Amino acid sequence: MEYTLKSQEIGCLQTILDTVSEQGVDVDITLPDYCPDIEKVLNCTFSPKIFTQNLSGGQLRVEGAVTVRVLYCDSVKKNVRCFEQTTPFSAGFSVKSVPDEYGILTSTKNEYINCRALSPRKLTVHGAFSLYAKIIGKGCFTAYGPGDDETLRTKSRKISCMGLTAFCQEQFSITDEVSLEGRPPVESLLKSEIRLLSGQCKAVNGKIMLNGEINMRLMYLSNFETGDIEIVDYVTPYSQIISCEGVTENTVNHINISLMSGEVRLKNDAFSDNPIIVLDARVCFTEMGYTPVDITVIEDSYSTKFMSSQQFGNIEVVKSAIPFRDTFMNKSGVKTEGIKISKIIDMDCVPTSSAFSVSEGLKAEGRFNCCITAVDDEGYPIYIERSVDFQRELSVEAGADNIEGLDFFINSVSYRIAEDESIEIRCEIVMTGSAQLRETVSCVNYIEISEDKPIEDDNCALTLYYCECGEKVWDIAKRYNTSEDLIISENLLEGDRIEEAKMLLIARI
């Protein structure tokens, strides 16, 4: 006979899909008539944008476009110029099954770029970027506790853990207009970067109030004759109210905010007295809300009347999940490798990778690319790109052994040209994630009692057992088909472990 266990379902985060696909980019560029000839290519970059991510019929379909941006020095004025060309991309991923509540997380990372000038007006660009696709959702695991059969003795354990009680995902747009009144005119846009700086939320019953900032960084040519370049660095705050079933004031909220696509364009004529820059961004917000919960699991069992058998299984519980945010200054230096810089026009630090390790405490490692547009000592525009690595000891809850969703962004950058042909860089780095402590618990998930196989009575009126120091009362009770409580009470014991070798009286039920 199968013994009926009391079941308790606990919400947990499930990963349904976690994969990556390489997307090739092959573009032939012919400059239009209004663009001057190329003397030297300074830099070529990819800017992938994700427009849609749809899951239907067991297939995840991601549609987007990649913008190829070529920054070059023209052959006439020796000024910095730019040309962009956009090409669409799409990718499909097979998905077996998904829960009712799920979210799609996508991101991109540039892998390599080769740009070659075939002539002063023709370029060929070859490269690739990685498209990361992840589907997460609200699942559950089942914990089994003891039932009501008094003949079955169970050794139980209470575990405090975090249960996933709220999950939602929503996309929304951020639009803003920036006036450049009072600034030099915009003759040609050279580069635009959009990045999310921060995001914090406050939960009330069924609602998330999200507040954050998005940064637009713009480089433009203000004078064709002199080659003067202007930098616009603008921060736009945003707020959003998102419906999310299950969140309360007491929910521990973990959020993921990612930039899917962004565009910067001129609203009116570049030569107007008050040029307007329009920012359009598409953001994906994902909420995972946890609530503390206690569960009871069975570590061992036996019947005092019948033969019984049991099966074990493993469950993984999140003991704690604490959102963290760590802001720090990172100092580093990059070598110009023989290039003498007279002036830095623009510097942008772009995050590329992050990871963590748990040896001797939690440590984070990251890397970002330092992209420098400058002028050499002869007044010629140049471009330098260097990778910078950093490490950081994370101050999180004691015992945390995992960082879920580790990410970082660079809030601000300052620099100084040093005398030894190097550039000293100071970056304010903000790291975010969820510090978690997980535990894998082995517990009983099935018990069968054989009522046709009663345990034979040995007809002993009195049983004496000489125990060793350190033995557990549970093990002794299981061996003699009696209960812990009887052994403890009959022998005036003060705990569930024998403190010294002694003779015990084994009482029968």
Image (cartoon, helix red, strand yellow):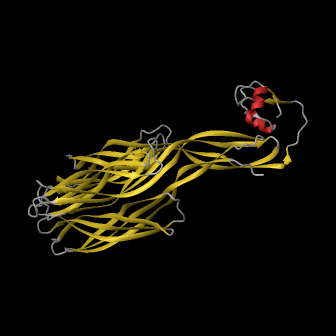
Can you give x and y, in whole percent of width and height, for residue 45 in the image?
29, 63
Q: Is residue 402 visible?
A: no
Give whichever of 386, 295 is nearer the camera. 295
When asked about the image quadrant of residue 48, the answer is: bottom left
Report the residue at 16% width, 64% height from top.
268
Residue occupying the point 80% across, 38% down: 479
Residue 3 position (above or below residue 279): above
For this orientation, the residue located farthest to the left is 225
Name the foreground residue: 321 vs 171.
171
Residue 320: x %, y % from top left: 51, 42
Above or below residue 34? Residue 494 is above
Direction from residue 408 to residue 74 in the image, left or right: left
Which quadrant of the figure contains the C terminus? Answer: top right
Count how many numbered circles sit on residues in the image: 0
Q: Is residue 303 visible?
A: yes
Residue 165 x/y as whole percent? 51, 48
Above or below — where is 170 with respect to 92?
above
Taking 17 as reference, is 379 left or right? left
Q: Position of residue 373 (x, y in %)?
A: 21, 57
| Farthest residue, direction front | 205
Q: Is residue 104 left or right of residue 451?
A: left
Find residue 172 and report its image quarter.
bottom left
Q: Relative to residue 381, is residue 445 depicted above or below?
A: above
